[in-house]
Image: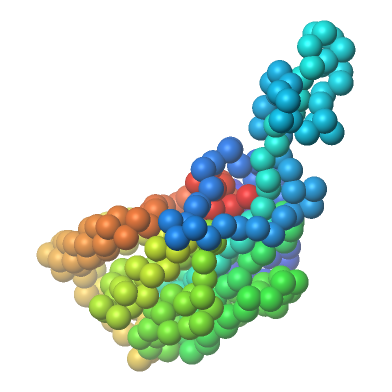
Amino acid sequence: MSPLLSPVSPELDDAHFALLGHYAKHLGRAPKAIRFASQTGERRSRQKGHGMEMLELRAYQASDDLRHIDWRVTARTGQAHTRLYAQENDHQRLLLMDLSNSAYFGTRHTFISTRLIQLAGLIAWRAKQQGDTLSYRLTFGKEDHASNRSNTLPTLLTQLKNASYIHNRNHPNNNNSVWSNTLLTHKTHNKDVIILTDKQYWDDSEESALMQLAQHNSVHWIQIIDSNAFNLPPGQYQMADETGVKQVTISKQSMQRAKDSFFSQNTQMRKKLSSLGIRYQAFDLTESPDKIARYLLSQGALH
């Protein structure tokens, strides 16, 4: 079985994060996608490398740059042809990961928290490999980390490793959403924003901050769901939370109530995200993180 799908432990080590770097390198190429453009007239202007990406080859026109004439095609056809290029900008993205104590749970393969952390690691490695700019904010347990500096991959991977530790579920949930109450998100414009969280609700002030983020950026929301959690057979289970380990009795009725409550909240969340223009996608815990990363690649969230 794939070491990404079912890691040896939900607590990830340095070797696993190195493996994520290998998988990130072999995700493939993103299909050409419509890049996000602000309605307020803001444009991305930082050029990356040569700054040019060829779009097509066509017959030469008087306004074309002579440096872009394709002399081989011109010689073969007897008619001047020129290459059309599009400016390739520095791809800037913001990674937001927010884990509640409930995320440190899973019935198959690994924990929901681990899957989200793996995906964050793939995103971090991919940005480094492509030379893209990556800002981030991570909230888990009692910790809150953020950075908008370049060359922070080792620090980010260390923080992600710390996020995978199970003791983080012993702390109450952070009341504030990862996108609110921070200058990092308040000043974010013209970026691909990737939100990784198991949380499904927020208050009015947090919704206002999320609306502002979606107005100025292309926002992608990824959720991991353990569908098998609602199919456990009736019986007694030992469950751990911030108060310790206790026995929980599960009946068919209590399981159905929990399932109905979860999916009711989920439906409301999806409607809110859709109204804000946020792209939402849920994946089951049985999906490998590299498959989820390829989805983000297909959506233009990764380069």
Query: Which quadrant would residue 15 be assigned to in this image?
Result: bottom right
Residue 294 place in picture, x, y as percent: 56, 46
Query: Which quadrant would residue 155 be assigned to in this image?
Result: bottom right
* Residue placed most toward the observer, 97 or 39: 39
Q: Residue at x 68, y 45 (%)?
A: 87
* Residue placed most toward the observer, 251 or 111: 111
> Among all residues in the image, which is located at the extreme left?
253
Horizontal side of residue 235 vs 57, given as left or right: left
Horizontal side of residue 271 vs 94, given as left or right: left
* Residue placed most toward the observer, 151 or 243: 151
Q: Residue at x 53, y 78 (%)?
A: 184
Give the vertical position of 227 relative to 106 (above or below).
Answer: above
Could you tell me if residue 151 is visible in this image?
A: yes
> Among all residues in the image, which is located at the extreme front?
62
Q: Residue at x 50, y 52 (%)?
A: 36
Could you tell me if residue 245 is visible in this image?
A: no
Give the vertical position of 278 relative to 300 (above or below).
Answer: below
Residue 78 place in picture, x, y as percent: 82, 8
